[in-house]
Amino acid sequence: MSILLTLMLIIAGTKLAGDLAVRLGQPSVLGKLIAGIVLGPAALHWIEPEPFINEMSEIGVLLLMFIAGLETDLDQMKRNWRSSVAVAVGGIVAPFVGGYLASIAFGLSNGQSLFVGMLLCATSVSISVQTLKEMNALQSREGTTILGAAVVDDVIVVILLAVMMSVLGTGEGSSVSEIMIKNGLFFLLIVIVSLFVVPQVMKWFASLRVSEPIMSGALVLVCGYAYFAEEMAVAGIIGAFAAGITISQTRFKHEVEEKVNPIAYSLFVPVFFVSIGLNVRFEGIGSQLVFLLVLTLIAIAAKLIGGAIGARLTGFDRRSALMIGAGMVSRGEVALILAASGLESGLLPQRYFTTAIVLVIVTTLVTPPLLKLLNTGRSNAVKAVDQ
């Protein structure tokens, strides 16, 4: 299919599906995700996964996390760092144990079960970010805690992956010490560059006599931060998020925020949403349906409860704690990358790859309505207290 026709279908399909979701009382992101399933191989076969879609999708998720960084209240994130760590740890321990025990019960080997447990630890808050934005809750205490927990979660999961590759002898993983050194260097250098280099770089770009110099400088930083993150064994989305926080501390924040939204939401972000649905395949699922159902229930419940316990222990009320737990449920592109790595290294059997992909899709689909439900209850409770 022509690239132009594919993009036409993606843009039109996501906007119409998003509008329909809003009219039905759901976040628009839910409709956009379902549009990808309907347009893709699982239903109409109008759009197939292609390299250019994957590349545009990667740009879309980077821009989404960059915007989240721009809109993050850094002071509130600093105040909530204990909650973020507790939520991340709770949201890793519970899914890991649940995924491991379930896999053992269904006959997977010890190594394969460990990998499935680790796969359930992953969190990708890009979908949660969009949902929180639609609910005007991204800058709330709950929103900043979710974002902080996602950063901690990513670092821990990367280290877990390194441990697993080393212990299970796949020969494809870096040593744990190397991963930890790279992670530490990444955060140290990002802080130094953000404080002393970025403000000067943005001023220099602003002085250039070309069109959109400030926005161009911001995009250079996003790409540079994301690339550096990937080179240092940290997910690119964490680099993009850090770039957003960095620019939010400069005088260029509002101009960048105003101009990046049309770039992201008119093209790249819709492609990202559709690309998730394109991964859905139903062939061969029937023989693994029970395992898929059990694992999906564990994936949702363990993240929700584990994250909520971490939030509850650090001062959040029950409703807010559950909302934070719900924000960590989506596995998104992080788990897709882990699943592909597991398949390549032999830690995830080929016959379970589709199960893993469907699990990722389901956790991603349930996150927006779950967040909205819990946020509505929280808002009503706050109004009742105010009255």
Image: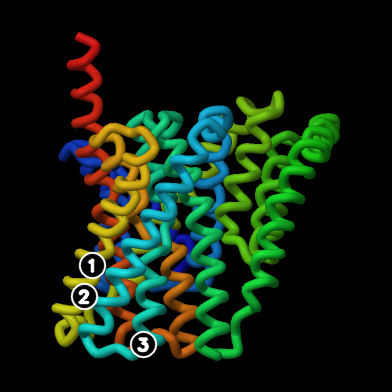
Residue 68, given in percent of the width and then of the height, sits at 51, 40
Q: Which quarter of the figure is the N terminus placed in?
A: bottom left
> Along the horizontal axis of the image, is 14 left or right of 184?
left
Q: Disc 1 on helix, strand or loop?
A: helix
Label whose residue precedes the other's in the sequence (3 or 2): 3
Q: Residue at x 39, y 71 (%)?
A: 119
Q: Amino acid at mark 2?
A: Leu
Q: Residue at x 23, y 65 (%)?
A: 298
Q: Amino acid at mark 1?
A: Thr
Residue 174, given in percent of the width and then of the height, sits at 64, 78
Q: Which quarter of the figure is the C terminus placed in?
A: top left
Q: CA–CA distance between discs 3 and 1?
A: 20 Å
Q: Disc 3 on helix, strand or loop?
A: helix
Q: CA–CA distance between discs 2 and 1?
A: 6 Å
- In the image shown, does 369 or 60 lie closer to the viewer? 369
Residue 381, given in percent of the width and then of the height, sits at 20, 23
* Residue contact between numbered discs 2 and 1, judged by CB atoms under 8 Å: yes
Q: Which residue is mark 2?
A: 292
Residue extending farthest to the front is 313
Using the rendered image of the protein, determine whether residue 103 is visible from the camera's viewpoint: yes
Q: Quadrant of residue 315?
A: top left
Eyeballing the image, is 352 above or below 19? below
Residue extending farthest to the top is 387
Q: Which residue is mark 1?
A: 296
Q: Which residue is mark 3?
A: 110
> Along the horizontal axis of the image, is 242 left or right of 23?
right
Q: Amino acid at mark 3?
A: Asn
Crowd rating for badge 3 (residues with CA inside 10 Å; few <14, some 14–19, many 20+): some
